[in-house]
Image (cartoon, helix red, strand yellow):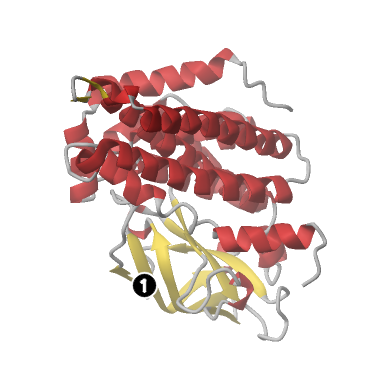
Amino acid sequence: MTIDWQDPAHQEIRDAIRQYAEAHFDEAMLQSWDREERLPEAALAHFAGLGYMGFTVPREYGGGGRDIGKTLVVIEELSRISLSLAVPYLMTACYAGVNMTECGSEAQKRRFLPRVAQGAVRFAFALTERAVGSDLAMVATTAQRRGDRIVVSGEKHLINGVNIADHLYALVRTDAPEHKYRNLSLLLIPVDAPGVSTARVQSLGMRGGAQLCTVRLDDVELDTEAIVGGEAGWNHGWKLLVGPGLDIEKLEVAAMALGVAQAAVDEASAYACERIQFGAPIAGLPGIRHFLADARTNLLACTLMLRHAAERIQAGLPCATESAMAKLFICEQARDIVLGCQTTMGAYGCIEGHGMQRRVRDALIFPLVGGSSAIQRNNLAKRLGLPQ
């Protein structure tokens, strides 16, 4: 199946999200989500009712069929409004939907995917640790088999959305440390399980209902049904982690960055046309005109790169290179575009009452999450065959 970007359904999704936003949100409300760290549950339920959560779920499990193009359109449009909408959507449609579709056992698919399509379940990625970021294969959190039980101990750090998640999608070490890449498993850990505790981590961007947390796992007991992929997934977590789901995650982050940058350019353009200085709109100044022209040009380049990678994933083609390129390029372009938009608005780009200050904080995060720009460059250089 390929992606038809001219499909009227894509524009219908964009129109539906924008119309709902215009009718129900204003900047003061978006600021309150950010300031009060409040989750817009009613809006998320509305979009679930439209079937948007089911774009990653096969029809036989109650979804609309796996459609990466529509999924990215939703992420992009929700991100134009607020990451308070986009991040919970990811936690349902992508962290739960994509990973269960790609990696879950048949029993896990039957258990979770219908609930994903209904918007009734959220996963939080629990991969990184204090000493483990890009080198995920070195996780120190352990899981041991004790009869028919699994006991998990360790700590996960900088985990987003634990406070609104149902399960942690956790990478743990299940064999000897020297068996790197062959000693890892993925587990589904209920966030309310005995032994799970969390502590808030204050962060610069991506504020809203989904909070950044440290998670302690103190002898958390699970049954074997918690192994992602079933019994066959034990000690095979690395293979599951680096499959198509990881490529899709890079595009999810890129789509968020693109949506935030588009919103920033819209805001800066409107401001430049309305702001009068020395008797004329500042949009008439060559420096501002040229910046906005360049920004729109770069946004189109980002859009085309995102679509190219998405087409390969949807078609089942290898996409590790294209997804890394898209993540690297789009996230860095988005950061630079948003900072330029803030400069265009001057002091008004830094204060509450305008969305720009919120977008700046979000844009600074994108080159760091979902695989940093440095790791994308390392991986790309390796795939190009460059000597180390």
* Residue 182 position in % (x across, y down): 73, 74
Residue for point 36% across, 72% down: 194
Is residue 4 visible in the rendered image? The answer is: yes
In terms of image quadrants, where is residue 379? bottom right
Determine the residue located farthest toward the top in the rendered image: 8
Is residue 330 depicted above or below 179 in this figure?
above
From this view, report whether residue 345 is shown above or below residue 227: above
Image position of 78 (left or right of 188):
left
| Residue 5: quarter of image | top right
Looking at the image, residue 205 sits to the left or right of residue 167; the answer is left
x then y, percent, for residue 1? 74, 28
Q: Quadrant of residue 269?
A: top left
Q: Secondary structure at mark 1?
A: loop
Which quarter of the rendering shows the C terminus? Answer: bottom right
Residue 296 vs residue 367, the one in the foreground: 296
Say which residue label 1 marks. 194
Rendered view: 89 above or below 206 = above
Examine the rendering and report whether any part of residue 112 can be seen: no
Residue 352, horizontal then vertical, whole percent: 17, 42
Q: Residue at x 55, y 42 (%)?
A: 113
* Mark 1 Cα shell of 10 Å, populated few (<14), some (14-19), many (≥20): few
Disc 1 residue type (three-letter): Pro
> Which residue is found at the position 66% from the left and 21% from the top?
4
